[in-house]
Amino acid sequence: MTKRNLDHIEPDLRKLARPISKLTLDPRQARNHDERSIAEIKSSLEAHGQKKPIVVAKDGMVIKAGNGTVQAAKLLGWTHVAAVVSDDADDVKRYLKEARDAAADE
């Protein structure tokens, strides 16, 4: 058996690693990423690795926050990303947005 390579994921997040092949992009995601946006995310991931987890709904493993990250990760040939899997992914998504907004205000 081949050991999965998680070097691109922040060490503290590696325990959250999920196979990309098991995740489903959310067709209803409010934010659609164009090629330029995906290229920018890809460049950031390539330079810095994954520093924050995506958010996935447990039911159906649908990505609620991080569709662009997963699309870019696929382009990089990654097989895994760190993901918070929750029964209430919409609440987790809101919490992460609020935390990000609060950090930006500081």
Image: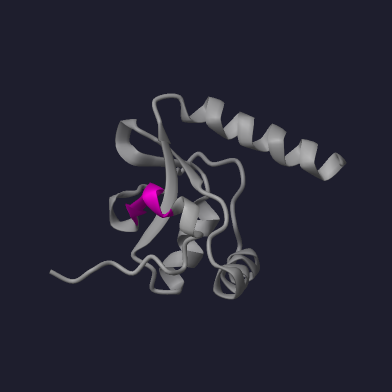
* Residue 84 in the image: above or below residue 86: below
| Residue in the picture at 56% in, 70% down | 42
Whether 13 is drawn above or below 8: the answer is above
**Left or right, 29 with reference to 27:** right
Q: Which of 40 and 11 is in front in this view?
A: 11
Q: In which quarter of the image is the N terminus?
A: bottom left
Dividing the picture into quadrants, the one containing residue 68 is: bottom right
Which residue extends farthest right?
106
Where is residue 20 shown, x and y percent of the image? 34, 57
- Give the residue at x 71% y 41%: 100
Q: What stretch is highlighted in magenta?
A: 14-19
The correct choice, above or below, for 89 with respect to 78 in the image is above
Q: Tell me residue 46's x, y (percent).
A: 55, 74
* Residue 61 is inside the magenta segment: no
Q: Is residue 77 left or right of residue 98?
A: left
Determine the residue positioned at 42% across, 56% down.
81
- Quarter containing the C terminus: top right
Percent x, y of residue 101: 77, 38
Name the residue rendered at 32%, 30% in the picture: 59
